[in-house]
Image (cartoon, rainbow, N blue to C red):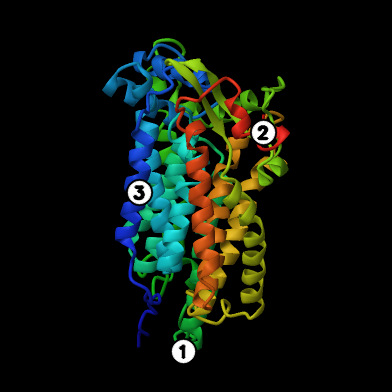
Amino acid sequence: MNQPIPLPPRASEPDPIRGVLAIVAVFAVLVFWRLGTPSKIMFDEVHYLPAARHLIALSSRLNPEHPLLGKELIALGMMLFGDNPFGWRFCNALYGVIGLYGAIRAFWWASLSGRGTLLFGVFLATNFIWFVLSRIAILDMAMAASLALAFWQWALAARKGARVHLVLAGLFMGLSMGGKWNGVPLMVFPGLWYAHARWRASAGQASAGQASAGRPHRALAWLVGRAGGPVPGVCLIEAALWLGIWPVLVYFATFTPAMFYAVNPLSPWHLVEWQQTMLKLQDSVVKPHRYMSHWYQWMLNARPIWFFYEKWDGAQRGVLMIGNPYTMWAGLPALLWCAADGAMALARRSLALPGKWWPTGRDRLSALSGMVALFYVGSLFFWAINGKPVQFYYHYQLAAVFLDAALALVLAQLWRRGLRWPAWTSLALALLGFVYFFPILAALPLPSVKSFRLFTWMPVWK
């Protein structure tokens, strides 16, 4: 006799979709406002704009050390709106808006906390990094926005138990790799989660008397069993297809235009070999840069980058790649809280009960807190161990998302305990920081060439 499939818990708070749409709409207006300013090439646009032009002409490889999706998006914007600053940056801006929505919805479906979701949405929209990278024609937004959409679909697959969301999660994981490889360490977690959830489900079936003498061994049932959560009807082997093989195929598909170059086209039979060549090319960049930094400096918000600072378009203008001082610093103790909260949930073994593949009650937020802390570490681990000597602050983009999530989770839990002032104070300080720094996030006219002193509070920020 089949046991009923355990369903994920329902939200105790209403879906804050209207608030989410309001946050995303305001963010979109600010991102697209004067998107073509400055009209001069900024920072690494000097590398990716020529590569996009080569893609449009299908002439030859340029900037071969990176995957193609980010350059394809830049090229698409140029084909739609012309080879001008607005065209260069249009697709990144649009994808930044879409990715923001995906990240916020991922938080909602994972936490079912309406207040936490809105706090996270504001923190991410105002963390400076997501905003600035949405307004420049480089590759990082293609990677980060795709990964945000993948996590959204992953959370939906867990909540709604639908195969289509697993398929979409794998699709966006592949696209994220097609932007940059930065998010690859995080892409192992959906598959590991599914394997753990299936193991718990098989334990629940065994304890319910479903594993009789004539049934397959539990290990075999773990691999091919389709009953129970997290996605009914999808066994672990099929999940490995959607979360493992499918993303790799999507990633390889992003190289299709390179197979039609007039000079030295890429052979589809050499795709795997070409990945090794790309890795060698990336590791070959060893020339020091004045803004190069290390992962531990990113955590302290200690080594930002001036993407642009000169007189252009009739005024002194600047674009500073830095994190919102409040959320970047307040997020660190929140991250420690989340790590401790997740560890205590694990110690209670509330997530290891037979058949209990979805935590409930306070364990839901505690489990998510632990995962957020783990994802933060995973985002930095890639940079801490890789031997690439030239790294920059904008590589902190993914880790900063989880830092914002940690702060939102802590504030949401404090709110539930009756402490509301920390949430309101944090919200006010994050918005105040965004407003104060906005002139050098959006390249607004500055009073003088010395205006950078208003924003570089510490010597290392200059």
Residue 62 visible from this viewpoint: no
Point out the image quarter for the N terminus.
bottom left
Residue 37, image x, y percentages: 41, 23
Helix or strand or loop: what does disc 3 sit on? helix
**Of marks 2 and 1, which one's residue comes earlier in the chain?**
1
The residue that label 2 is drawn on is 461
The residue that label 1 is drawn on is 209
Drawn side of residue 12 relative to residue 345, left or right: left
Whether 161 is drawn above or below 285: the answer is below
Helix or strand or loop: what does disc 2 sit on? helix
The residue that label 3 is drawn on is 24
Mark 2 residue type: Trp
Residue 94, image x, y percentages: 34, 37
Which one is in front, 248 or 92?
Answer: 92
Residue 302, image x, y percentages: 69, 39
Point out the image quarter for the C terminus.
top right
Mark 1 residue type: Gly
Give the label, 3 or 1, closer to the camera.
Answer: 3
